[in-house]
């Protein structure tokens, strides 16, 4: 287990591979561990890091930093302490919001963002996320299999207050998020059968910035990287290999969105 100290508190992370830096940011349920298969696929060409946010996994239960601002600051401090410069971010749920917020604050640092199961506003979030324990959420969102075991195993480590505090910041994110002219290349990925985060509607898709593209995984729920792992890994590699600054809109799966929003 790898750790660093931020504000004299333990922050847990893991790292695989060599190459350009890539950071994986987990969601409201689980920890860094469910990223392992994706990290292994990416580590062929990238140095893949994954961290546990405040209140999750093996990172300290630092309650005063449980809000979105505190988690964004954790990412910034981690990059500083590790000496990481320009970086690609892959975030899921909470991690997707943190990644987008960080890219808005530091566009010169973030090369690109993959935002998975990212709510565009608080109306997209099922209220159950803020009213259940992480263990109950894992049971709701995932079946039982070797791939989902890390989520079920680490969910009880979560401080429920960390989930609630971060969800409380989504109204701020709505006004300062993807639709607020994010200029960083951003690929949004949603599962069609996600009960936790509602799919963006057609008006929201039309209003996305030119550098943002949205794709849907038809056979996925809240965890596309687990539900359709091979497809997710191929898409991630294609996205990461695009030239810097190039829009991901050439990564075509648009017909799936058209069928969904007719």
Image (cartoon, rainbow, N blue to C red):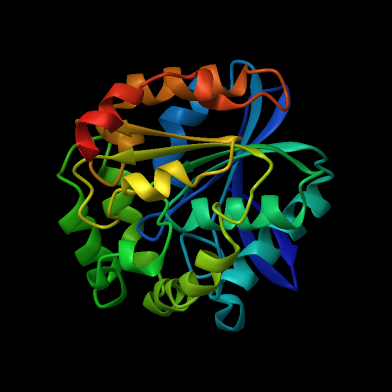
Q: Is residue 191 above or below residue 235?
A: below
* Residue at the bottom extreme of this rendering: 64
Find residue 16 and report its horizontal and vertical position in percent. 60, 30
Q: Is residue 86 left or right of residue 50?
A: right
Find residue 1 and report its horizontal and vertical position in percent. 58, 48
**Number of marks in the image?**
0
Q: Is residue 249 left or right of residue 155?
A: right
Find residue 209 and report its horizontal and vertical position in percent. 58, 42
User: Is there any visible trace of residue 237 in the rendered image?
Assistant: no
Q: Is residue 139 left or right of residue 118?
A: left
Q: Is residue 188 above or below residue 245?
A: below
The structure residue drawn at horizontal position 63% and vertical position 72%, both measured from the top left corner, is 70
The C terminus lies in quadrant: top left
The structure residue drawn at horizontal position 29% and vertical position 32%, both measured from the top left corner, is 257
Find residue 177 and report its horizontal and vertical position in percent. 56, 58
The structure residue drawn at horizontal position 32% and vertical position 33%, both measured from the top left corner, is 216
The structure residue drawn at horizontal position 23% and vertical position 48%, both measured from the top left corner, is 194
Q: Is residue 46 above or below residue 27?
A: above
User: Is there any visible trace of residue 132 in the rendered image?
Assistant: yes
Q: Nearer the viewer, residue 23 or 252?
A: 252
Q: Within the image, what quadrant is residue 102 found in?
A: bottom right
């Amino acid at each position: 287990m790898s750790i660093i100290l931020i504000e004299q508190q333990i922050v847990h992370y893991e790292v695989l591979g060599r190459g350009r830096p890539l950071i994986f940011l987990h969601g409201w349920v689980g920890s860094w561990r469910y990223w392992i298969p994706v990290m292994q696929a990416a580590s062929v060409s990238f140095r893949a890091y994954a961290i546990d946010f405040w209140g999750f996994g093996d990172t300290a239960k630092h309650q005063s930093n449980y809000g979105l601002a505190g988690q964004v600051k954790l990412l910034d401090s981690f990059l500083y302490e590790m000496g990481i410069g320009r970086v690609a971010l892959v975030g899921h749920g909470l991690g997707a919001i943190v990644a987008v917020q960080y890219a808005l604050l530091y566009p010169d640092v973030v090369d690109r963002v993959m935002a998975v199961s990212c709510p565009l506003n608080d109306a997209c979030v099922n209220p159950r996320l803020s009213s259940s324990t992480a263990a109950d959420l894992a049971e709701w969102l995932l079946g039982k299999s070797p791939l989902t075991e890390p989520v079920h195993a680490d969910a009880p480590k979560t401080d429920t207050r960390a989930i609630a505090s971060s969800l409380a910041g989504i109204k701020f994110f709505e006004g300062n998020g993807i639709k607020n002219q994010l200029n960083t290349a951003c690929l949004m990925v949603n599962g069609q059968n996600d009960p936790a985060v509602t799919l963006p509607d057609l008006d929201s898709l039309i209003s996305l910035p030119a550098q943002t593209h949205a794709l849907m995984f038809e056979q996925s729920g809240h965890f596309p990287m687990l539900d359709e792992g091979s497809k997710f890994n191929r898409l991630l590699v294609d996205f990461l290999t695009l030239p810097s600054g190039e829009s991901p809109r050439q990564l075509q799966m648009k017909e799936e969105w058209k069928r969904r929003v007719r």
